[in-house]
Image (cartoon, grey):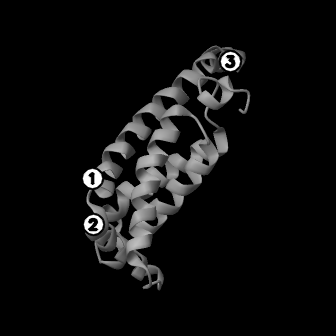
Amino acid sequence: MCFMVAAMSGLDKWRDHGLLVIRLGMGTMFVLHGWPKMAGGAKAWTKLGHAMRHLGIDFAPTMWGFAAATSELAGGVLLALGLLFRPACTMLIATMAVAATMHLGKGDGIMGASHAIEAGVVFLGLLLTGPGRFALQSRLGKG
């Protein structure tokens, strides 16, 4: 038992490095997901915004699509930087919840919704854990 406690405390020194890797990896991937949606303009936003129908919301699809594209693009940047971290995680969790609901509502099944569910779980874990000491907000004294 003492060995396990000593091993865990030794690994704990890498916690912030691990959070940095997750932030940079997930942030970069969501910038890459969000950029084409943002660059697609109103036509793409409207198509994306129709995902809200699966939640019973069928007004303003362009606005909802723009919000989703912004969430992925800006949320990815903020996540990677560790700035406005918890609001970014919250936006991304909400976006992934809508995406998972859309996939399930379309009949894609759990495997079709798995990417959104997995990403949402990671963002929830990050929301609870925090960005770590290598976050920009920690450097600015707001962490």
> Vertically, is 2 above or below 43?
above
Q: Within 10 angstroms of label 1, few (less than 14), some, or many (20 or more) residues? A: few
Residue 90 is left or right of residue 31, and the answer is right
Label annotation for residue 9? 3
Secondary structure under badge 1? helix
Tell me the residue at 35%/41% (across/down): 29
Residue 77 is left or right of residue 31, and the answer is right
Q: What amino acid is labelled 2 in the image?
A: Ala
Quarter of the image that includes the C terminus? top right
Q: Within 10 angstroms of label 2, few (less than 14), some, or many (20 or more) residues? A: some
Mark 3–mark 1 Cα distance, whole angstroms, equals 43 Å
**Residue topped by disc 2:** 44
**Residue topped by disc 1:** 36
Tell me the residue at 62%/42% (across/down): 84
- Residue 128 in the image, given as x and y percentages of width and height: 66, 45
Mark 1 touches mark 2? (CB < 8 Å): yes
Residue 60 is left or right of residue 106, and the answer is right
Q: What amino acid is labelled 1 in the image?
A: Pro
Select label 3 or label 2 by which is in front. 2
Q: Is residue 34 visible?
A: yes
